[in-house]
């Protein structure tokens, strides 16, 4: 099965660019995510981390 897929993909012109594009998208996404985490303000992180705890206190059965 993999032999069929590999042979079929090799016949497509310009197919070698797709792995490069997907790697770049993956790399850029995680670099931006890392940059956002490093530069996030501590007050914002505290507020967001306490949100699940606040929801539990509001719901009483």
Image (spheres, grey):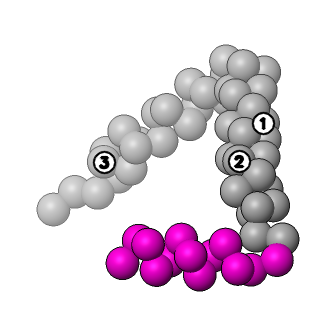
Q: Dividing the image into 4 quarters, which one contains the C terminus?
A: bottom left
Residue drawn at (22%, 57%) of the image: 60
Q: What is the x, y in percent for residue 39?
A: 78, 21
Q: Is residue 48 left or right of residue 38?
A: left
Taking depth in this image into account, of 9 and 61 the one nearest to the observer is 9
Taking depth in this image into account, of 8 and 48 the one nearest to the observer is 8
Element assignment for label 2: helix
Tell me which label, 3 or 1, sits earlier in the chain: 1
Marks 2/3: CA distance?
A: 40 Å
Q: What is the x, y in percent for residue 7?
A: 56, 76
The mark closer to the camera, 2 or 1, is: 2
Vertical position of residue 1 compared to residue 45: above or below: below
Tell me the residue that label 1 is attached to.
32
Marks 2/1: CA distance?
A: 14 Å
Question: Looking at the rendered structure, which numbered label has been put on residue 23?
Answer: 2
Q: Is residue 55 one of those drawn in magenta?
A: no
Q: Dividing the image into 4 quarters, which one contains the N terminus?
A: bottom left
Q: For the stretch drawn in magenta, what is the main secondary structure? A: helix
- Magenta-highlighted residues: 1-13
Q: Is residue 59 left or right of residue 32?
A: left
Residue drawn at (49%, 32%) of the image: 49
Mark 1 residue crowding within 10 angstroms, few (<14) / some (14–19) / many (20+): few
């Amino acid at each position: 099965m993999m032999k069929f897929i590999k042979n079929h993909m090799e016949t497509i012109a310009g197919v070698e660019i797709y792995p490069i594009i997907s790697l770049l998208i993956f790399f850029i996404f995680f670099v931006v995510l890392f940059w956002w985490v490093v530069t996030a303000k501590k007050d914002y992180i505290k507020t967001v981390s306490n949100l699940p705890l606040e929801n539990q206190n509001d719901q009483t059965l």
